[in-house]
Amino acid sequence: MKKVILNLAVSLDGFIEGPNGEVDWCIMEEDMHFDAFIESIDTIFYGRVSYDAWGNFQPDENTSPAEKAMWQGIHAKHKFVFSKQDRTAEKATFIADDIVSKVTAIKQENGKDIWLYGGAGLIKTFINLGLIDIYKISVHPVALGSGKPLFEALKGRVGLILTGTRVFKSGVVELTYEPEKQLIANS
Amino acid sequence: MKKVILNLAVSLDGFIEGPNGEVDWCIMEEDMHFDAFIESIDTIFYGRVSYDAWGNFQPDENTSPAEKAMWQGIHAKHKFVFSKQDRTAEKATFIADDIVSKVTAIKQENGKDIWLYGGAGLIKTFINLGLIDIYKISVHPVALGSGKPLFEALKGRVGLILTGTRVFKSGVVELTYEPEKQLIANS
């Protein structure tokens, strides 16, 4: 079964953006092998705002070949956009309702895993519905002091099981978790 | 020179307490060797509220021998309380002003390191004054969804250098950092 993977960068004090939307503190290193992550998924879930911002993003000509290849890889995935707007798009499928049953159906298709891209509202919906299978949180070596929190107010605590850690030269530490209940449900 | 060490537990989403002050998610394991940390310090810095709550705390008779020993160890330290109140105490020295010069003088005394105990207001003051030498943040495997943030609104970003990680059986990951500027200043 395909897994829904949340893969996010966070500051040590739990923010995904600075107070003015800053993400310039996010580090992308070769030894993170983000290309391997992209290779491990075949589907991306976007919220509507994230899709409009990044779903068809084209890097400009000054972009490095590695980053161009990354965007090419991203744009080759199946894309689903969760939105109350009744829209269609050439390269994405819009989902407006019945999230649990539709996501469950997508997860049962053959293939690779699913990247839950965000934004914050969609992540919150997925957490509250118990739809995230793997959390990959890259803790960055900076305290922002204020900003946009990792998770918007959840309806309750989410217990997690640490399943992996990776430490990078830059001081980023990637923590991988599975939610407690799903581990129990699958065992 | 003595170092000021912040040693705190935090949820994955950056809270040190739940929305109602809950700290029941904090894990204390034998393999964390908290006793070795207590052994490595000879001084504790408290805010006034933290001191009144914990500075003279006596565990009740049902407490485990290990925890009783921990409290005995804690109460054997030199204690300083940072407070605008002009108070004296038998077993603690109150500091009301000139924080930077007084802390600098304490750091230059011989001996072991200093535990910056908290609370949040004192931690914020120490961060903003650049007085913390080591951050030890134990990321717990839980998302609380809301609560008291790790750091209260800081006056700016604090860049950190990762100097160590420890992964515990419980899924707690201890991240140790030094502030960027102090590293540069000391080098």
Image (cartoon, coloured by chain):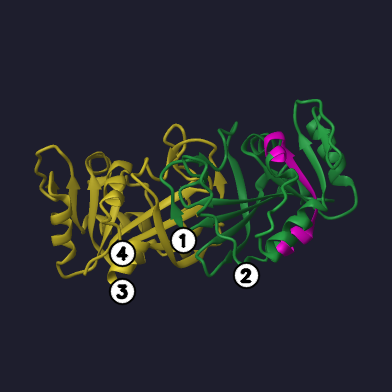
Chain colours: A yellow, B green
Q: Earlier in the sequence, mark 4 or mark 3?
A: 4
Residue where numbered disc 4 is placed: A182
Q: Nearer the viewer, mark 1 or mark 4?
A: 4
Q: Say which chain tag 3 marks.
A: A
Q: Nearer the viewer, mark 2 or mark 1?
A: 2
Task: Pinpoint residue B47: horizontal percent, then vertical percent.
Answer: 71, 37
Secondary structure under tag 2 reads helix
The 10 Å Cα crowd at callout 1, few under 14, some 14 to 19, many 20 or more, is many
Q: Do marks 1 and 4 share a chain?
A: yes
Badges 4 and 2: C-beta atoms under 8 Å apart? no
Spatial separation of the CA atoms under disc 3 and disc 2: 27 Å
Secondary structure under tag 1 reads strand
The 10 Å Cα crowd at callout 3, few under 14, some 14 to 19, many 20 or more, is few
Q: Earlier in the sequence, mark 1 or mark 3?
A: 1
- Give me the residue at 10% from left, 40% from top: A87
In the image, residue A168 sits, relative to residue B102, either above or below, namely: below
Spatial separation of the CA atoms under disc 4 and disc 2: 27 Å
Residue where numbered disc 2 is placed: B31
Question: Residue flagged by tag 4: what amino acid is it?
Answer: Gln
- Give me the residue at 37% from left, 63% from top: A180
Question: Residue flagged by tag 3: what amino acid is it?
Answer: Ser
Residue where numbered disc 1 is placed: A175
Number of disc labels: 4
The 10 Å Cα crowd at callout 2, few under 14, some 14 to 19, many 20 or more, is few
Question: Is residue B106 in the magenta section?
Answer: no
Task: Pinpoint residue A165: horizontal percent, then vertical percent.
Answer: 48, 66
Q: Say which chain tag 4 marks.
A: A
Q: In the picture, which quadrant includes the C terminus of chain A?
A: bottom left
Where are the magenta residues, as a range?
Answer: B35-52
